[in-house]
Image: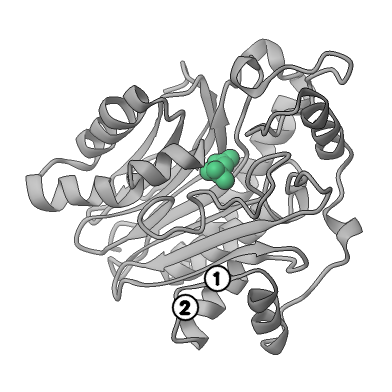
Amino acid sequence: MSEIALALHGGAGTIARHLLSPEAERDYRQALHDALLGGYELLRQGASALDAVEATVVRLENCPLFNAGRGAVFTHEGHHEMDASLMEGATRRAGAVTGVRRIQNPIQAARLVMEHSEHVLLAWPGAEEFARQHDLPMQPPEYFFTEHRYAQLQEALLSGRVRLDHSQEAPLEEPIPFDEDPKKKMGTVGAVARDQQGHLAAATSTGGMTNKRYSRIGDSPLIGAGTWADDRTCAISCTGHGEYFIRAVVAHDVACLMEYRGLSLAEACRVVVHDKLAPIGGEGGLVAVDAAGNIALLFNSEGMYRASISSRQPLFVGIYKEEA
Ligand code: ASP
């Protein structure tokens, strides 16, 4: 059987052991584990990398622990505006949506854009209308409501800052500006895969930043910044402070270093995450798989919710930096 591989993330940031209760940690690990095995089983049965990353991300979107789909963070006005994108490495076709409020699984809308429109990125009501026309399940705002995200919004409103935070631990009575928040975390989800045919795919989905306004868009729905897949090099899904990932064109840059400078996947990821992103202040990380099925899980933050498995590598689930 040709090498198959799957890696996923559930966000990166200041995720320290003392900030996560044992129960919360167990729940996160279980959710990462289940999403990974669900996607991997599809690959084992011969599914395409595209189907596997979509199914993996759908599962993470349906889990309220993560800042995507059901657990999406609140905007300044108290809504949810979700972004998603996906890319197919064999054809370099891509699809994305931004600012959608009612679509149950934004990653499915991104795939529809890729396969049933002549466009790459659809936005706000137009994207929802398109998804409705293709019978994607919609949900009322209550579906996306989670208590801890609402508390985060109240905290962010009090501090007057935009937050890349999906932590429920920050006490409401002590608002902390985002830049000084020791508990800041990013909860975007994403997956990359290599299938039995040797094809690669990447998918990313997010609720963006707590307290965001003015129709702010991060890197997650932007092909090249938050998501990239090319069978000749690699598939990448990013998570972190989106503005910096956009400025560093992170996902595409990893592929460029491999294609033009012949770097290995691990080396290309290291250069981008540590040498290029960190110096401009970009906190976060990425998951990646290359044409040979090698996996890289890299971040410059304190932690990243992550998991991986391949026909060569045993199942791995990690949260903190020190976990190999
Ligand atoms: N990258 C996402 C954004 O900036 C946030 C995240 O990764 O948590 O919207």
Return the residue found at the far top.
Answer: 18
Residue type indicated by callout 2: Met
Query: Is 321 drawn above or below residue 43 in the view shown?
Result: above
Residue located beneath label 1 in the image:
110
Q: Is residue 82 left or right of residue 42?
A: right
Q: Secondary structure at mark 2?
A: helix
Number of on-image labels: 2
For the C terminus, give its image quadrant: top left
Q: Toward the viewer: 300 or 26? A: 300
For the N terminus, give its image quadrant: bottom left
> Distance between the Cα atoms at labels 1 and 2?
6 Å
Q: Label for residue 261? A: none
Q: Secondary structure at mark 1?
A: helix
**Residue 35 location (% of width, % of height):** 61, 51
State the image quarter where residue 156 is shown. top right
> Does the numbered disc 1 mark a residue whose Cβ is under 8 Å from ligand 1?
no
Q: Toward the viewer: 141 or 314? A: 141
Asked whether the residues under the numbered discs 1 and 2 touch, taking CB atoms below 8 Å apart as contact, a structural biologist would say yes
Taking the spot 20% from the left edge, 34% from the top edge, the residue there is 267
Taking the spot 42% from the left edge, 37% from the top edge, the residue there is 244
**Residue 61 location (% of width, % of height):** 68, 55
Q: Toward the viewer: 117 or 35? A: 117
Residue located beneath label 2 in the image:
114
Q: Is residue 3 left or right of residue 113?
A: left
Query: Is 297 drawn above or below residue 192 in the view shown?
Result: above
Residue count near mark 2 (Cα–Cα under 10 Å), binned few <14, some 14–19, many ≥20: many
Taking the spot 68% from the left edge, 19% from the top edge, the residue there is 177
Residue count near mark 1 (Cα–Cα under 10 Å), binned few <14, some 14–19, many ≥20: many
Return the residue found at the far left.
Answer: 261
**Residue 41 location (% of width, % of height):** 53, 60
Q: Is residue 235 left or right of residue 15?
A: left
In this view of the protein, can residue 314 be seen by the observer? Answer: no
